[in-house]
Amino acid sequence: MLTFFDLLRVYKIDPMEVRLVRHGNKEINVLETFFNDIEKLKEYTAWQKPGKYKDSKFLAIFAPGRSTTSIFLGLWKINGVTRNSDLAPKHLNLLEKHDLPMRWLEKSDRYDLSLSSEMFHLIQRLVIDWGPSTVSWVQKKNKEVVEIKAKNSIGEFSSYDNIRLSYDDLRILINDIGANSTWFNALSSVNGVYLIKNKENGQLYVGSAYGKGGILGRWSLYAKTGHAGNKLLKGLDPSHFEFSVLEISPATMSADDVIARENRWKECLGTRDFGLNDN
C-alpha cells in the first residue's frame, strides 16, 4: 500500500515536518478558490489560532473529494509566523482584500505561506483517503494514497446523476479527451437536457443537446466561448458556471421531442422569468 508519507520521502521531505490540512467547503469552495483565487486560499489557510501548525515546515493542503477522499492542492512552505501581538494594519488589509473575517485579526496568528515546487506536478492528481468527516481537519497522521490520476484527468465518470462539472474541469475534459476517456464516452453518446448554474448568484440556464457529439458536443462550445452563443450568458464570467444533466434522452427521441423536454424544464425551473433563458 502506497502512503502519502511514502511520497514525501521520495521527495526527501521528512513527514514529521508536514501538517496535513483538509479544508471543508462550508465557508469557501476549496477547489474553485484554488483555481480562481489562490491568494485567497493562501490567506484562508494562513490565519489560525496560535500554535495551530506548531513547528511544522510544510503544509500539505487538500480539498474534499468524493466520500472520504481528498484531493491534493500542493505542498506549501511555512516561511515564518507573525504572532497575534505583532499583527499590523497591513495584515488587516489582507483580510479586507480577500473578504475574510475581521475578527481573525484579534485572535489569530498569521503564517507566511508559499506554494512549493516540490510535488507541484501532483496537484489535483493525487487523491488520498482522509477518513470520516469527523476526523480533525489538521493532522500529522499518515494517509493511504487512493489514486494518482493521469495528467489533466478530472477523475473517472461515475453516473449522469452525479455530474457537477466546473467550467475549469469542462475545459480540461475538452482539451485532453485521452486522459478523460470515460467522460468522453459517456457524454458524447447521449443527448438530453442539461443545466448551467451560475454559482455567483444562483441563476440557471436550461439547454438541450440533440445533434452529433451528444451532450459533450454541445458543451464543447461553452468550453471554447464561455457562452455558446446564448445571449444572456454573454458577458458573464464562465468560471462561475457549473454543468449538470437534468435528463438523458433515448437515441430514438427526435430533436423536436428533446426540445419539448427542454421547454418543460424551463417552465418547471422558471428560467425564462427568473433565470438566463431568453426564449
Image (tube, rainbow, N blue to C red):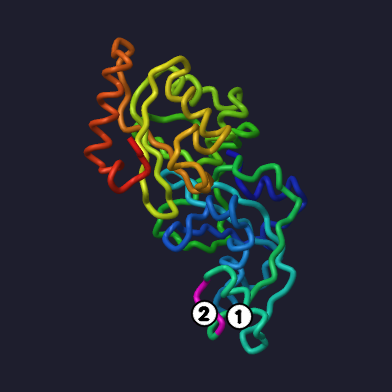
Magenta range: 100-105
* Residue 194 locus on image (x, y percent): 36, 32
Q: Name the residue under label 1.
A: 92
Please tell me whether residue 10 is drawn above or below residue 55 in the rendered image: above
Q: Nearer the viewer, residue 166 or 140?
A: 166
Q: Could you tell me which residue is drawn at 59 percent across and 52 percent down?
A: 36
In the displayed image of the protein, which residue is found farthest to the top?
252
Tag 1, which secondary structure? helix
Secondary structure mostly seen in magenta is: loop
Residue 159: name its quadrant.
top left
Q: Name the residue under label 2.
A: 102
Q: Distance between the residues labelled 2 and 1?
A: 7 Å
Q: Could you tell me which residue is drawn at 62 percent across and 77 percent down?
A: 93
Which is nearer the N-term, disc 2 or disc 1? 1
Query: Label 1 is placed on what type of residue?
Result: Leu
Q: Nearer the viewer, residue 277 or 166?
A: 277
* Residue 110 locus on image (x, y percent): 63, 76
Horizontal side of 50 relative to 209 (left or right) equals right
Q: Could you tell me which residue is drawn at 37 percent across and 37 percent down?
A: 195
Mark 2 near mark 1, Cβ–Cβ under 8 Å?
yes
**Does residue 102 belong to the magenta stretch?**
yes
* Residue 181 locus on image (x, y percent): 54, 22
